Amino acid sequence: MSDTTTDEHAPHTLDRVVIRFAGDSGDGMQLTGDRFTTSSALLGNDIATFPDFPAEIRAPAGTLAGVSAFQVHISDHDILTPGDAPNVLVAMNPAALRANTGILSPGAIVIVNVDAFDERSLAKAGYEANPLTDGSLSAYTVYEVPMTSITTEVSKDAGVKPRDAERSKNFFALGLISWLYTRPIEPTLAWIDERFGGKPLVREANVRAFKAGYHFGETAELFESSYEVRPAKLEPGEYANITGNIATAWGLIAASVRSGLPLFLGTYPITPASDILHELSKHKHFGVRTFQAEDEIAGIGAALGASFGGLLGVTTTSGPGVDLKSETMGLAISLELPLVIVDVQRGGPSTGLPTKTEQADLLHAMYGRHGEAPLPIVAAKTPAHCFDAAIEAVRLAVTYRTPVMLLTDGYLANGTEPWLIPDVDTLPAIEPAFATGPNAEGPDGTPRFEPYRRDERTLARPWAPPGVAGLEHRVGGLEKADGTGSVSYDGVNHERMVHLRAAKIAGIARDIPPVEVDDEGGDAEVLVVGWGSTYGAIAAAVRRVRARGLKVAHVHLVHLNPFPANLGEVLARYRTVLVPEINMGQLSRLLRAEFLVPAESVSKVQGVPFRAAELEAIVLDRLGVTVAAAPSDGKVSD
Amino acid sequence: MTDTALTNGAVPVPVTTRKDWSSDQEVRWCPGCGDYSILAAVQMALPDFGVRRENTVFVSGIGCAARFPYYMNTYGMHSIHGRAPAIATGLAASRPDLDVWVITGDGDSLSIGGNHLIHALRRNINITILLFNNQIYGLTKGQYSPTSEVAKVTKSTPFGSLEQPFNPLSLALGAEATFVARTHDMDRKHMIETFRRAHEHRGASFVEIYQNCNVFNDGAFEGITGKDNRAEMLIPLEHGQPVRFGAEGEHGVVLRSDGTVHIVDVAEVGEEHLLVHDARRENPGLAFQLSRLSRGPFEPTPIGVFRDVERPEYGQQMADQMAMAESRRGGPGDLASLLRSGSTWTVGAG
């Protein structure tokens, strides 16, 4: 294909571009975006993606409710977010256009499937007049492409029924965008072969549609030029493009391998966490047991049973499931057994926004159990970081014999970024250190095993799975006597046990790294403190502010309970502490309560991540700078 | 853990007595509670089962019966209300080398934990479930339970219960259970024999034990389990034997052509027409009929093993699937390869 590109049509070079594919839920937009992302990753671009889809599997076709979109940001330098405002929108129907025009950057390219703009579809999308002719899109460069008719036309003689052929139009769109941004076509063709090899007609229709889209770009002379985004200068090494859910699953397997503890996942399907189950269930040859339980309660119950048996018990869920698991989490705290609870947060309360992201489970993770029931909380900050966060959650759970909550969210779960694949030998080693024999003496001096006799350093109790003679013991949810673990209703003992359990978790602060403060020069007055998936948007906003010659600092917390030991001292250094969260200010409350600092909440709860520009504006405001329309140099990396 | 189990397996099982299986904890049920006799039966039975204390785990939920694990000198977990079958499922599926017992009550397993019970049975998890049925809530001091009879007057039903009770055996059979039995706390020998059969069964075994709560529901089963009443009121089920009862074996059970079972006088119908009990029958229909022969502990009631059929056990199937996955992949998983199993690309230095 490259030989047809003459000098006169040489691609323009861009440093980055944000493309949004939008269509009906059944149009295959997630797949289209995913393929474009993979081609770009293989080309060496830095990438960040944002799949944005409705909860309904197939909402009524052509309606706004049914619009499914996939946004991808590709660049020749390192980027942090999927981009605030798309530069390109591919709209497969009027509803997809209507749902997305509001967020485009000025002058954006809009490519529409003009075949779908009939009166009925326009009406379904709520358009009173055709936006392609009424001038309402004059701020954009609009290309009308008859995607459906070309797609059906090219497959006419391949024996594919027109109705089936039409379903390949997403590959036409992919082909067209692949030409426009000079992506190689071979990886996609190879992928189509592999995926649809068993269905020759579908394979053929998809290949023809994809090539037709590519050739259309080349020959239609609709587009003035194609574009290229050159490879980014990333750290040397081998990379994979990975979603947060896959990274979580692989992190759990890695922790299982590094600890020698077979993994047992007890879980119940729930959006957006189910892909962790799907992924783990493929890897039984790693000794992974996956158990799809009858409900969320049984999922965590079975995981806890496996932990009692000496395996690495894990349960995965999202908000509503955490509600149901709370009682068993309390039991795990009382039993002091390792357990990892992964909460892929979504919009709440109740069923809320199943496919949209939110960070509103932090206080639930902290306090969502009856009694004094502390547990460690680890939060992943980017899709790839889910891998490390999962390993850290397991490390803490095993070392401290405690349930640990790992918080990710819908944005991390489905979003992707390039991941520098780690050398396996550099991953943390995790030592189960099972009990092997008696650890105490009875009143008559005979050696005996006391299940609640603690390690002096970690305050962790011994882990003694069944199978070892002499270590038989009973555990339970009733309060236990310090040391022996016998049932005890003694009030003073209860207070001691409450304090011991709290001290064990608080003591983890000695075993986690201090927070790193990103503060060039160390003299900023405004500090932005974030946790979880706001990392990209905050870091991008910080870059933008600094590009104006201004100062701002950034701290991003991975450990939410306990906090790193130096956090209070860091917070006290700044005049203003801003805490952006996709909730009503949960971390800010914790910081205010814990450190008596005037932490200021920056809240957004719209089911979507912060945009860098939103945070930039707030930081500038706190710096006393009047907000300009665009960043000073017009070329800041998000 | 497997290594430990294998090592232990090579050594003969030590000879034990009831005392070896009793923990040092003081038993705290009400004096006269039927739970004492069940505990004694289990502690007396286990030394003859050829099993090891260290490979035995008792898991319970909440309720009077749920204190049981504390009194066994084995591994044990007193968990949370209704969840014992779920917790035991994870344990038994992970550790096929263990003997896992679930101790539960009518409130624990038929009310709050009903869902876990039926799914554990359906999956045929290798656990032995002992359901202490006293038809009352004891630990919360006397409310009606899901097995209490209609019109029962309790603290929470001063005008009488409105609810149709569960028939635990019918429920278990409907939940695809492979082993279903009933015994009672007044007959140690019958309990031990029933527990032995339940323990031998690979997969989920479900045993309902009629248990007297002498404080809140005293005498609930006296009409059938009392020494003087048993002959006329208990119908022993023995595999391969005609179903008959009465002091002289004068009563029996027949199967009618419409598929229902009925109590008859043997003299009237003739011995050759009695139903011959077949616990191994694949179709649970007949066992279901037998489970409903009695409407409650005021009519002649069958006890013994209703159903005992073979079906693959979950934990073994899980282990087989893992072994198959490993052999298909040509060996155990390699982490470095997993992390490179998607599309990857290399960024060079400089």
Image: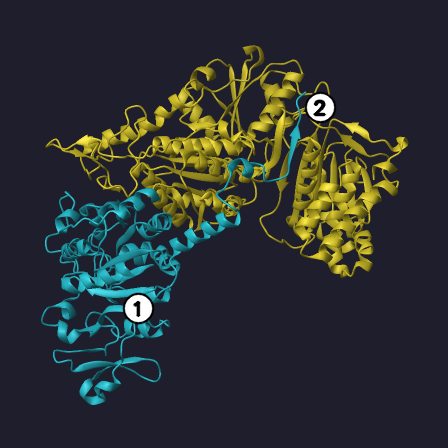
Q: Position of residue B131 (x, y in %)?
A: 25, 58
**Residue B29 seen by the camera:** yes
Residue at the location (13% across, 74% down)? B231
What's the colour of chain A in the image? yellow
Q: Is A532 rendered above or below residue B21? A: above
The span from disc 2 to disc 1 (Cα, nearest Å) is: 78 Å
Residue A629's label in the rendered image is 2
Compare residues B79 and B17 and report the one nearer the observer. B17
Residue at the location (48% across, 32% down)? A389
Quadrant of the frame with the C terminus of chain A: top right
Chain under callout 2: A
Q: Is B313 rendered above or below residue A231? A: below
Q: Nearer the viewer, mark 2 or mark 1?
A: 1
Q: Is A287 rendered above or below residue A399? A: below
Residue B307's label in the rendered image is 1
Q: Secondary structure at mark 2?
A: loop
